[in-house]
Amino acid sequence: MSASDLFGLAVTVVLLAYLTWAMLRGERL
């Protein structure tokens, strides 16, 4: 994979982790 692919994957993982954490805390964005 290229650097841009890895960067996009990293951003996606971080966003999913943040959304999961926010939902577990029961907070709205």
Image (tube, helix red, strand yellow):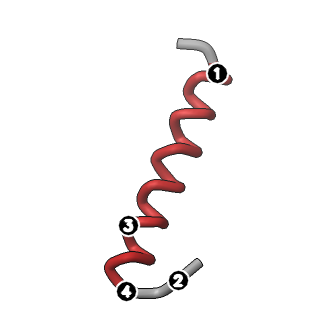
Gap in angstroms between the C-alphas marked 2 and 1: 33 Å
Gap in angstroms between the C-alphas marked 3 and 1: 26 Å
Q: Nearer the viewer, mark 3 or mark 1?
A: 3
Tell me, yes or no, whether the two marked residues, 2 and 1, touch with CB atoms within 8 Å.
no
Q: Nearer the viewer, mark 4 or mark 2?
A: 2
Q: Earlier in the sequence, mark 2 or mark 1?
A: 1
Q: Within 10 Å of the Cα at label 1, are there few (<14), some (14-19), or many (20+) other Cα atoms? A: few
**Element assignment for label 4:** helix
Gap in angstroms between the C-alphas marked 2 and 3: 11 Å
Q: What residue is drawn where x is 53% and y is 83%? A: 28
Q: What residue is drawn where x is 46% and y is 47%? A: 13
Question: Going by the image, does 23 lie left or right of 11?
Answer: left
Q: Within 10 Å of the Cα at label 2, are there few (<14), some (14-19), or many (20+) other Cα atoms? A: few
Q: Earlier in the sequence, mark 3 or mark 1?
A: 1
Question: Going by the image, does 25 lie left or right of 18?
Answer: left
Q: What residue is drawn where x is 67% and y is 23%? A: 4
Give the residue type that dot 2 points to.
Arg
Give the image quarter of residue 8: top right
Q: Within 10 Å of the Cα at label 3, are there few (<14), some (14-19), or many (20+) other Cα atoms? A: few
Gap in angstroms between the C-alphas marked 4 and 3: 9 Å
Residue matched to label 1 = 3
Residue matched to label 4 = 25
Residue matched to label 3 = 20
Residue matched to label 2 = 28
Question: Going by the image, does 15 lie left or right of 24?
Answer: right
Q: Earlier in the sequence, mark 1 or mark 4?
A: 1
Question: Going by the image, does 27 lie left or right of 26?
Answer: right
